[in-house]
Each structure stands twice: as structure tokens, then as C-alpha cells.
Amino acid sequence: MKKGKFRRFKDSLVGEIKKNKNVFAVYIILRALVIAVAVMSLISGNIENFFLCLLSLVLFLLPAFVERQFKVNLPDTLEIIVLLFIFAAEILGEISSFYVRVPHWDTMLHTVNGFLFAAIGFAMVDVFNRSSKIKFDLSPFYLAVTAFCFSMTVGVIWEFFEFGMDMLVQLDMQKDTVVNTVSSVAFDMTATNEAVYFGDIVDTVLITADGQQIAFSDYGINGYLDIGIIDTMKDLFVNFIGAVVFSFIGYFYVKSRGKGKIAGSFIPTLDDSEE
């Protein structure tokens, strides 16, 4: 896309955001904060953080893009939460290191993620249900199941992505967890598939091929490191909770024929011209 066309396209999306004062106010505040962080990143020479800021600015336009391209109306509450979620994940989580500095920050975002994607999955099918152009009719129960499955699928794919980045690029997206017990068949010298248990682990020592010894306790790690699995299962579990919560809300929303205020704040609807 040429520069002029991209600018007109971006301006049209911003115009879409301006339709609602509350959403536009949140968008302007978050955009200003991200630009400020981007400038500071450039001054300090942190190019990676600068590109994360650019990515965040692009993602801020995503709700307006969805509304325009798919002819749907996104509830104000949903739009604001999406904008805040992007800011919390990219700027606070990655650049400001909230994933490490703030306890349970990652857990909170994965819970919200499960809730939001259940809402999106629910809306995708609910739009078909409501459309007069498409013969598609699912019961409230199956709508809720579809929303739940969609949310969990997105959660699993994200964990695949984190694992892939850790393996290929040597990142630590799957944050390691300090544990003090180990039970593994890897220590079974009899090859009888018996788990060998070690408890009260207070330190671990790594020995490299050149003879260098690295004690975990020297880095303030008093135990053994679980490499990602606990973090992955915790993320999937809280994603499950978020998905279940919205699936229940969505179920009763459809049962009440769209009278639920909570679900109505998260479920997109078709434009009047598309009904």
C-alpha cells in the first residue's frame, strides 16, 4: 500500500474511532503515552522497544478496522478494553517489564484474553444467527460451546507461539518457575518407569562443558527451575476461567433474547444495513 493510500486509510480508521467520545478519549491518551515511550526509546537507542511502540499504534486501529471491514458495531466497553489490553501487554508488560515486576500481571492478562476471545467467538456465530442473509441457527448452548472452544483454541495457539519463540530465538516468553521438588522418571536408573522424587531443593548447580559451575543461589534462585510448563498450564487454566465466565454470560444473553446488559457490552452486532 502506497504512503498516501495508507495515510488516507489510517485517517479513515481514526475517523471511525472519533464516532464515540469515550473510545476516542481513551485512544488519544494511550496513543500519546505510546508516542512518548517511542521517543524515549529512540533517544536511548532501544530499537526493539521503538518497534514495539509502532506495533502498539497499529494494533490500536484494529477495532476500527474490524468495524469498517466486517460491517459490525463494536460496543464501547469492548473497544476500550481491547485498547487497554494492548497497552497493558505491549507497553506495560514488555517495555516496562510488568511481566516480571508485577506479580500475576501475566495471569491477569491471560484471564482477560480468555474472556475477550470468548466474546469474539460468540459474536462471530451470533452475527450469523442474526443475519437475514445467512440461514444459520444455533441454540444458546451451542453458541456458548463455540465461544468457549474458540477462546481455548486461541489460547493454545498462543502458547505454541511462546514455545516456538523460546526454542528458536532463545527468548523466555514461557516464564520459568522456581520449584523445590522434582519427581521424574529421568532419574530412574532401573528403567522401570518409576518416578524418583527429590524434595526440599534449596539450590541447583549448572556445570558447562568447559567446567564452569553456575549456582542458582548466586542469582537469588533458591531451588530448581521449571522450564515453562507451569507457566503454560497456568495461562491455559486462567484462559479457561475467562472463557467459561463469558460462555455462561453469553448463554443467558441469548436465552433472554439480547436483554443481558453485561454480555451486550461485549458482543458486536451487525450494522442496521446488514441486518
Image (cartoon, rainbow, N blue to C red):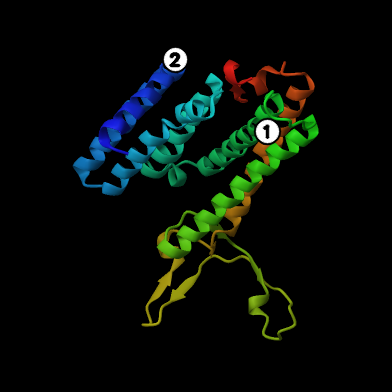
| Kind of residue sitting beneath label 1 | Val
Q: Quadrant of residue 196?
A: bottom right
Residue 9 spot, x, y in % from top left: 35, 29
Local secondary structure at mark 2 = loop
Q: Nearer the viewer, residue 132 or 201?
A: 132
Q: Which residue reaches farthest bottom? A: 190
Residue shown at the point (74%, 34%) measured from the top left: 144
| Label 2 crowd (10 A; few <14 / some 14-19 / many >=20) | few
Q: Nearer the viewer, residue 174 or 79?
A: 79
Q: Which residue is mark 1?
A: 125
Relative vertical location of residue 45 with respect to residue 10 in this rendering, above or below: below
Q: Is residue 119 left or right of residue 138?
A: left
Q: Nearer the viewer, mark 1 or mark 2?
A: 1
Q: Which residue is mark 2?
A: 19
Spatial distance from mark 1 to mark 2, Cα to Cα? 26 Å
**Which dot marks residue 199?**
none
